[in-house]
Amino acid sequence: DVTLENYEKSVSLENFFFNKPFEENLPFNSLNSFIDTLCGVLEEKGISYGVVPEDMAAPDEAWEYDEYGLNVFSLCLPTSGDDCHSLHGITTTVNKMKDLRDSLISVTNFLLS
């Protein structure tokens, strides 16, 4: 997703929903440990991130997945402008796009390991 939050960072973590651990081997068992685990993965890769508090996050598709009882969050590309969903375009950087890609790969690989 894209966001207007945390532009000074490479990625923004938002819209966290923790419902239950589906497998006993998952490294988290609460919302806080879910967030801490994701932050730890990004820190290990040297990727800067910001976390948007629950009361500040704009609803997105994560809310729909929560309805199915999934553990979910939004990994967002920080942008600048008036409307991050504008048809007139938004501003970000190539480095942020690379870090978003690397973040997604790192989190996925971590969860699959």
Image (cartoon, rainbow, N blue to C red):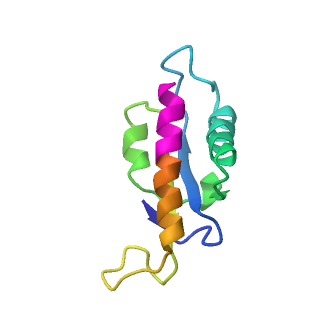
Q: Is residue 10 above or below residue 16?
A: below
Q: Is residue 69 visible?
A: yes
Residue 91 picture location, percent across and down: 47, 80
Most common SS among magenta residues: helix
**Which quadrant does the N terminus fall into?**
bottom left
Work out whether residue 14 or residue 96 is closer to the camera in this orientation and state it.
Answer: 96
Q: Residue 100, relative to residue 45: is it above or below? A: below
Point 68% across, 33% down: residue:
33
Foreground residue, 56 or 32?
32
**Occupied quadrant, residue 8:** bottom right
Q: Residue at x 37, y 45 (%)?
A: 64
Residue 87 appears at what percent x and percent y? Answer: 30, 81
| For residue 109, above or below residue 16 | above
Residue at 47% x, 47% y is 104
Give the answer, above or below, for where 68 lies relative to 3. above
Q: Give the range drawn in magenta.
A: 105-113
